[in-house]
Amino acid sequence: MKSAKDWAKIYANEKWQQENYYVGDDLGAQCKIGLTTINLWSPVADEVTVNFFKDGNPDTRPYWTSPMRRDKRGVWRWSLPENMHGTYYDFTLVIDGEKHFAVDPYAKSVGVNGKRGLLIDMSLVRPDGWSEDIAPARTNETVIDEIHLKEFSYDPAGGFPENERGKYLALTHADTVLNGAGQTPTGLNYLKSIGITHVQLMPIYDYGSVNELDKDQHEFNWGYDPVNYNAPEGSYSSDASDGMARVKELRAAIMGLHRAGFRVIMDVVYNHTYNLDNGLQNTMPYYYYRTTPDGYLSNGSGCGNDIASERSMVQKYIVDSVLYWTRMYHMDGFRFDLMGLITVDTMNEIRRRLDNKYGRGEKLVYGEPWTAGQTTLMLDKPLADKSNMGLLDDGIGIFEDDTRDSIKGSAGDTGGLGFVNGADGIEWKIQNSVKAWRNDGSPFKSPACVINYVSAHDNQTLWDKLTATTPDEDTRRRQYRLSVGIYLTCQGRPFMLSGESFYRTKGGNGNSHDAPIEINELRWEDAANKGCEDLANFYRGLIALRQQLPGLCDKGGFAHTRIGNQWSQPGAVGFMVDNTDDEQPSLWKFLTIVYNRKNEPFEFELAEGEWQVLATSADTYLWRHPETVSGQYELGPIDFVILGQK
C-alpha cells in the first residue's frame, strides 16, 4: 500500500501531470430527458464500479451495480439512455490493490450526512419563479452583512414560521416582525431597513460537523468543515433525507433574498476538508492535499489538512465548483475562507472566468488574506495572502485586518487597544485606513480590494471587544458609534456582522464555532430595546448618507487622490474629500470628516466658506435638514462629524 509520500512522488512527475490533466466540463453526473451520464476522474484507479440506491440512507445496500469504462486522461465513464433523476449513487474503486468507497466529488446533492450522491436533473427541482430570478441592480455602494442561517432565524421572537426557523425557507420571508406582530422589523425586513445591499451566507454547502438527523435541531456549528463542496447542507432543509429538498429550498432562499433586494455572497472553504473520508481523498489518495516531505498532512488551515490548489486538477475542481454555484444557484459573489492558502493562479483564474461569463466585476470576489499556520506547497506557486496582493487581480478583495485592529485593537488580544479605546500614536493608521491603505508602494490597487469591518463571525463581537477594554458603559457606547463612524467613512467596501447594529454580544466568546445556539443566535427582542433602536437608526442614516458620497464610494485606482488635507494630533484625525462625480452627482462638492476619540470636546478650524453638518455620532440624519457652520467647529467627546460644502 502506497504512503502519502509515495503518492506525492507519482503526482510530481511532469509526464504524469500532462497525461492526466482533463480539460472537459462534464465531470460528475448529468441527468436529462433520455440520458444519464456519470464521469469520474481517477487516473490511479484500476477498477471503478458505480453503485445505485433507492434512497440516501448510508446503511442501505445497492439495488444495482455497474462497471465504469476507463477513458483517456484518467476519466471513467458510464451512461444509460434514461433519466435516473432521484436515484442515489456512489463508487467502489480498486486503487493500489485496495477497495475505496467514494461519493462523487462533483455530486450536486447528497443523502443524509453526505455519504451518498444523488442523480439529479436540476431543471426539475426549481421553485416557482426560478427561471425569472435575477439579482437586484447594483447600488452606489456595496454594504455587506454576514449571516449564519441558523443564527439568523432560530429565535422564536423573530417571527419566522416555527417549522422554518433555522432553515433555508426562513430566507423566503421578507416581512417578518418581532413576535409576528407590531412594528419592529426582524430578519430580512430588518436588514433592508438598515440599508444592507449584500447578504453573505456563512457555509451552506454540505459540511460534516452537524448531524443532519438531529431531531431537536440543537446541534450547532458555523460550518467551516466541508465534506461535499457542490451539494447544499441538509440540516437547513425541511427533510435532510431528501436530497432534492435541500436543492429546491436553497434556491428558494436565494430567490427570496433577491426579491427582497439583496445580492447573495457565498462563503466558501476551498482550503481544507472536515476530514479525509470524502470523495476527493477516496477517489485520488493524497492528490487533493498538501503533504510534508516526511509524508504528513500539511496543516496551514489549523484543521488538520490543506487543499493543494497548486495542482492542476485541484485548481480545476475549485474553479468548476465556483462556476457551478454561480450558474445553478445564481450566486452574486464569493467570500474565500483562509484565502491565503489558495494560490494566486487559482484566485486569478476564478476572477477571469467569472468576468468572462458575467461581465467585469459583476460577481464579487474577496477573502481572508492569511493562513492559520504554515503550509507546505507541492509546487512553487505564490499564495493569495497579503504579501502577494500585488499579484492578485484588482477585482479580488481582502478583509483589511489592519483597519479593524487600528480602530478597536487587535482581534487576537482581548485587551488590546485601538484608536477609539485609547491606543497612542496610531493616528497614522487611521489616516491610511481612510485611503484604503493606498500609499506609495502599497500592494492595494484600488479601494475595490479592501473590505472594511470591525466585527465578523471570528473573534469577539465589537460590543464584547469594547467591553473588555472599557468598563464604563456610556463611554463604551460612544466608542462603539465612533468605531462604526470610522469604518463607514473609509474608502473600500463596508462589511458587518449581523446583529452588530443592535450591540450583538456572545458573552465574550471569541470562538463560538460550536457553542450552543443560545450563545450564537440573534436575539431579535434586543432590536426593540430603545438603545438598540437608536443604534439601528444611527446605521440607517450613515449608510444612506454614504450612498450619496461618491468620494467615499469610488472604487477606482485613483480614488485615494480624492483624500486631501489630512492632519492628526493625539486622539484626533481629520481630512477632506473631493466629492465631485459626473456619473454620481452629489449635493456636496467637498467633505470634511473628523474623528475625536478624546473624552473631551475638540475644536478645529474649517476650510474657508460655509459648511453643512451632515452627520455626527448623535444624529446621522442631519443631512436631511443640515445646519450651516463656518470658521471654528467644536466636536463632542468621543465623536465624529461629516460636513459637506456645496
Image (tube, helix red, strand yellow):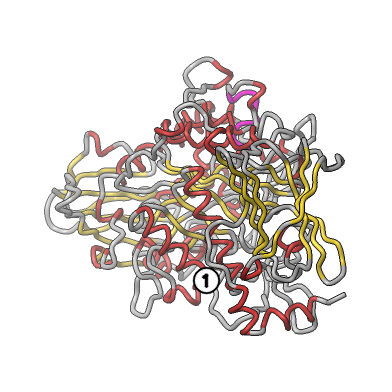
Magenta segment: does it hold 280?
Answer: no
* Residue 93 place in picture, x, y as percent: 79, 61
Q: Is 210 in front, or is 133?
A: 133
Q: Residue at x 71, y 46 (%)?
A: 117
Q: Is residue 74 left or right of residue 173?
A: right
| Mark 1, residue position | 384
**Residue 521, picture quadrant:** top right
Q: Is 294 in front, or is 569?
A: 294
Picture mark count: 1
Q: Residue at x 24, y 44 (%)?
A: 613
* Residue 625 place in picture, x, y as percent: 22, 34
Residue farthest along the top direction in this orientation: 181
Q: Main secondary structure of the magenta part?
A: helix
Q: Residue at x 62, y 84 (%)?
A: 15
Amino acid type, residue under disc 1 in the picture: Ala
Vertical relation: 129 (above or below) 425? above
**Residue 348, picture quadrant:** bottom left
Q: Is 546 in front, or is 54?
A: 54
Residue farthest along the front direction in this orientation: 81
Element on which disc 1 rests: loop
Q: Residue at x 66, y 68 (%)?
A: 74
Magenta highlight range: 151-158
